Amino acid sequence: MPKISIGLVEDNPTIASDLWEKLSLSEDIELTLKAINGKDLFKKLAHTALPEVFLMDIEMAEMDGITTTRLLKEKYPSVKILILTMFDDDAKLFEAIKAGASGYLLKDEKPHKIINAISEVLEGGAPMSPLMAAKTLDLLRQGSNDIQIQSVSKSAELTLRENEILEWLVRGLNVRQISEKLFVSDKTIRKHLEHIYQKLQVRGSREAVAKVIGRTY
């Protein structure tokens, strides 16, 4: 089975080394590209194969993670990007999601959490650290998100079950977690998600969440 190719974009060499030490615990992961900022990344991509998943720092002096994420998604729509940060910055959390990030984790997560997030994002999930997921929910509630979800749901003519699944998706849950909450199979949730994406006219979970957030902000 081929290894998952990873691109690491981090301007702090100590943190970059620490992150890779965590990832090296998995035999299924291979670091194929390292860059210190967005500008350095695009220069290297000119002669390096595109990794499947990027681990992206936000705070970088030259072309930050949000700008880099936005440009990467414009040029390579299928690429997966996990934002890794030391800060639980509210504004940057939403900006990262809007820019195209597939997940948002704190750098001090345990190694297995980051490794699992990489696998999850390749399966179409939107992994978040528990702290970030809780903060997302709190902020969305502050923004009257219940009303906004209902607005999106009504305009897209979602069923009650589809609306319920969309709410869990916005809270940061993946397919398995939603299926456990609703006591149905993963296959059933995936089928509902297909219908939700079609009705919302989006390509996946990230765009669905961004559409709700976009209505809120």
Image (cartoon, rainbow, N blue to C red):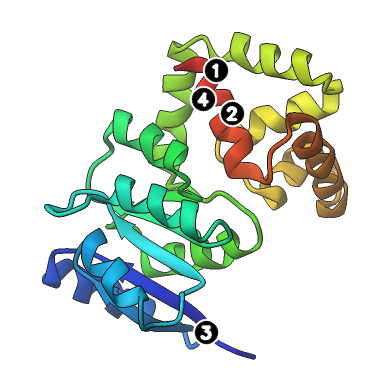
Residue type (three-letter) at the residue carrying disc 2: Lys
Q: Dots 1 and 2: beta carbons under 8 Å?
A: yes
Is 61 above or below relative to 215?
Answer: below
Residue receiving disc 2: 211
Q: Dots 3 and 4: beta carbons under 8 Å?
A: no
Under circle 2, the secondary element is helix
How far is disc 4 from disc 1 in space, using C-alphas?
5 Å
| Residue at 20%, 76% in the rendered image | 17
Disc 4: CA contacts within 10 A as few (<14), some (14-19) or many (>=20): many
| Residue at 21%, 71% in the rendered image | 16
Disc 2: CA contacts within 10 A as few (<14), some (14-19) or many (>=20): some
Residue 215 shows which numbered tag? 1
Mark 3 or mark 1, whichever is nearer to me:
1
Mark 3 / mark 4, whichever is N-terminal = 3
Pick the residue in front: 32 or 160.
Answer: 32
Query: Is 155 displayed left or right of 145 in the figure?
Result: right
Residue receiving disc 4: 213
Give the image location of residue 40, x and y in percent: 22, 68
Give the image location of residue 126, x and y in percent: 56, 49
Pick the residue in front: 203 or 151.
Answer: 203
Residue receiving disc 3: 28
Q: Dots 4 and 2: beta carbons under 8 Å?
A: yes
Residue type (three-letter) at the residue carrying disc 1: Arg
Pick the residue in front: 112 or 124.
Answer: 124
Quarter of the picture holding the C terminus: top left
Give the image location of residue 96, x and y in percent: 38, 41
How far is disc 3 from disc 1 in space, using C-alphas?
39 Å
Mark 3 / mark 1, whichever is N-terminal = 3
